[in-house]
Image (cartoon, helix red, strand yellow):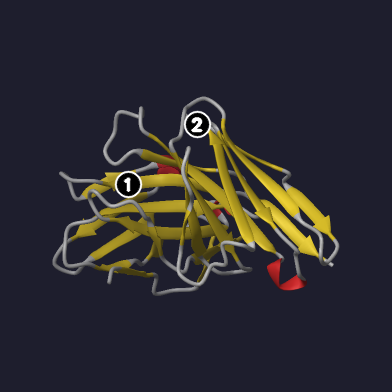
Amino acid sequence: AQSVTQLDSQVPVFEEAPVELRCNYSSSVSVYLFWYVQYPNQGLQLLLKYLSGSTLVKGINGFEAEFNKSQTSFHLRKPSVHISDTAEYFCAALPPGGFKTIFGAGTRLFVKA
Amino acid sequence: GAVVSQHPSWVICKSGTSVKIECRSLDFQATTMFWYRQFPKQSLMLMATSNEGSKATYEQGVEKDKFLINHASLTLSTLTVTSAHPEDSSFYICSARDPASGSTPFEQYFGPGTRLTVT
């Protein structure tokens, strides 16, 4: 069965510092990978996605992620975070031709002044 | 981008009553919508897949008689929580795929969620 693991439940970081949110997936086949952000009491917003091609994917709000097939990872990074980046971040996977998106447990990013 | 709306954004109801939550795709037609449930500080749990014009497909462990789903048109799906109890209190999120998005897989858009509190 496919699964998505987000290794950190919470990541506190100071404003303007870099951050990496870790995500690993398990799948015997290729998958599409996504990162979503959820602000309090809101739905999910797509940050970026990896479908194929270049392993470095750039998204909105200055975020980027790198697909590493050998390590089955898709870590999210931002070189300098802002207070407004405080939110819940979800990594997700979808097998090609599949229907159901599989979500990780989420990582709470807390940016401190 | 495409927009998915939910109504109401929050609702408080008494135990034993039923509550209906609407999910609409505002600027695209969605043959398939998804209903998720999210507990505090947890991930999204897929409850069911709603298919326009046919019965919903429920995930294992989700009571279909408890959570009634109706996908009456290409832009509207409803989730009715019947005989609600306090343990049904949760954040319910719907999403829809846009088959005309031109991308593969189809883009998935999420509604803003509905906070249900059962007293």
**C-alpha separation, residue under disc 1 versus residue under disc 2:** 26 Å
* Position of residue B72 measured from the top left corner of the image (x, y, whole percent): 56, 36
Q: In which quarter of the image is the C terminus of chain A?
A: bottom right
The amino acid pointed to by label 2 is: Leu
Name the side, left or right, on which A42 lies relative to B105.
right
Q: Can residue A84 be seen in this view?
A: no
Other residues around mark 1 within 10 Å, as few (<14) / some (14–19) / many (≥20): many
Q: Which of B2 and A24 is in front in this view?
A: B2
* Position of residue B105 measured from the top left corner of the image (x, y, whole percent): 29, 41
Q: In which quarter of the image is residue B32?
A: top left
Circle 1: element type: strand
Name the side, left or right, on which A67 lies relative to B85.
left
Extreme-top residue of the structure? B27
Q: In which quarter of the image is the N terminus of chain A?
A: bottom left
Circle 2: element type: loop
Residue at 75% across / 64% down in the picture?
B84
Residue at 81% across / 65% down in the picture?
B16
Which residue was labeled with disc 1?
Answer: A49
State yes or no: discs 1 and 2 in contact (Cβ < 8 Å). Answer: no
Name the side, left or right, on which B61 lies relative to A101.
right
Q: Nearer the viewer, residue B100 or B63?
A: B63
Other residues around mark 2 within 10 Å, as few (<14) / some (14–19) / many (≥20): some
> In this picture, is B6 found above or below A12?
above
Which residue was labeled with disc 2?
Answer: B74
Indicate the chain on which mark 2 is placed: B
Closest to the camera, between mark 1 and mark 2, is: 2
